Amino acid sequence: MAEHLSGRISLLQFLRQSVRLHVQHLTGSLAASAASPVYVVGNPSADLDSIVSAIVYAYFASGSNSTNGDESHESIRRPHIPLINLPDVRGGAELRRLRPEFVTALSLATESRKETASLVDSTLSEHLITVADFAAQIQDLKKKKRKQDIPTTFDATLVDWNALPLRSSTAGEGALTGLERVTFRIQGCIDHHVDEGFLPPQVLGRVEVGPGSCASLVVDELRKRGMWGGNPKVSDDDDGGSEELCGPAKLALSAILIDTNNLTAEGRVMQVDRASVSFLQDQIQSRSREDAAWDSKPLFQAVREAKASSLDLLTVEEILDRDYKEWSAAGEEKEEVKIGFCAVVRPLHWVVGRAGTPASLVEEMYSFARQRGLDVLVLMTAFNTDEKNGGGEFRRELFLWAVTEHAVAKCESFANRAEHDLGLRQWDGEAGIRSTLNAEGQGQLGWRRVWMQTDVTKSRKQVAPLVRSVWHVAT
């Protein structure tokens, strides 16, 4: 990827090169003099922010040798490959169906470039690698060559999270779900969640709680390291290389605007978000003649609509799994407690409607929890009362389920505390739904509560640590 040092290749060219480089590295066909790549991996929810953060960071970090003080760090000068953290989804038709907002953002970011590929299902797999792809490629190689010839250790940078789910005994090393037999050595990290204490001191990282979007931190960090420069005006003799940087700028902007609701989300917009949006807009307008009067509103609206409408095509299990994160904690008897968080951008009554009845939703969620061995399942909704136009009042709901008996007391403790911390109030939806979702039992269907969350400034990023804090967090 040496060409990328001058910033003269498009985003799609970079992604195709990344896929080829990945295959070469996996098959041992890299030139002897070539540096091994660093994989850039977002969190397991694989939402727009995570995927975009991985791609944008990898694009600028690949081969970069201008880091403003960090040029001695080995990983910075190596090629970087974005890896989408979806263990059950291959690149192609399923990726488009399950993450249409990302495909929409990528298409809009690249559609006006001089070199544009049609992002149909067949070409998506030529530009993107998921964890499922990675695992399948390893299995294919095992059928064709000796097992010991396949690499089992890879270097990685984490974005939008700061701890691997499967930790090894060596600090900063572990595995991904779906690639359990592969070890990733963490070289760097950029994240806006609570520090999990996983990263060793030598890791080149930035963990800063508060910004609405990890992509904001990625943009800011790239600027500070000298990897993403100023705003040169396009000139008559420009060969297009400057213009090509509009692609990653638009892609990064899409993630920031979605996660901050176009910089209007109360309590979620920080100065780094505003500064990054301003920088990206300047990049787009100053680097391309055709984008001199570019407006970000159509981009935001198109990606938001793709994200909202995509849920209509999914099953209840896919809706719960679409933006899902999981943690483990140590219980009082040192048994492991597994806590799962689902986030949905539709109201709870809509989710009930997708299931058919409140009782059917309970059954679907119970099956979801049992399949993952969960002790606690949390469903958070976030939506506007005027869904069609994205207006009206912004609301949040919280549904907490102690699936196993030994989690009931801790969940009750959280509920008492969260009434104040989150402004939990009785759910104001249909009484029949509320009575079915709420339950006192400690048997098969456990203890359940549903609330309105009146403190709408607190998303899963703040609520998850509160839930987990009633246990001693292990991983």
Image (cartoon, rainbow, N blue to C red):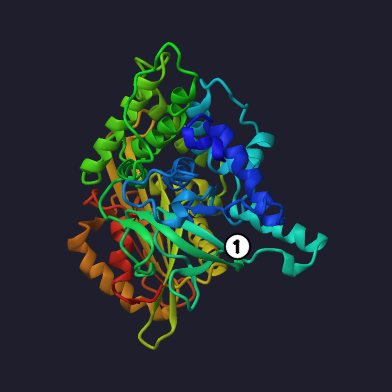
| In this view, 137 is above or below 388 | below
Outermost residue on the top side: it is: 236
Q: Residue at x 21, y 63 (%)?
A: 419
Q: Residue at x 66, y 64 (%)?
A: 151
On-image quarter of the C terminus: bottom left
Type of amino acid at the residue the image marks with label 1: Gly
Tag count in the figure?
1
Q: Nearer the viewer, residue 184 or 295?
A: 184
On-image quarter of the N terminus: top right
Residue 115 position within the rendered picture, expressed as x and y whole percent measured from the top left: 58, 23
| In this view, 65 is above or below 376 | above
Residue 359 position within the rendered picture, expressed as x and y whole percent measured from the top left: 49, 59
State left or right for residue 66 relative to residue 270.
right
- Kindly indicate the quadrant of the structure image that contains residue 342: bottom left
- Kindly indicate the quadrant of the structure image that contains residue 140: bottom right
State left or right for residue 474 relative to residue 317.
left
Q: Secondary structure at mark 1?
A: loop
Q: Nearer the viewer, residue 212 or 239?
A: 239
Q: Is residue 363 among what the camera can see?
A: yes
Q: Residue at x 21, y 46 (%)?
A: 267
Outermost residue on the right side: it is: 144
Residue 69 position within the rendered picture, expressed as x and y whole percent measured from the top left: 31, 50
Q: Which residue is mark 1?
A: 178
Residue 356 position within the rendered picture, expressed as x and y whole percent measured from the top left: 52, 49
Q: Nearer the viewer, residue 337 or 398?
A: 337
| In this view, 470 is above or below 437 | below
State left or right for residue 20 relative to residue 234.
right
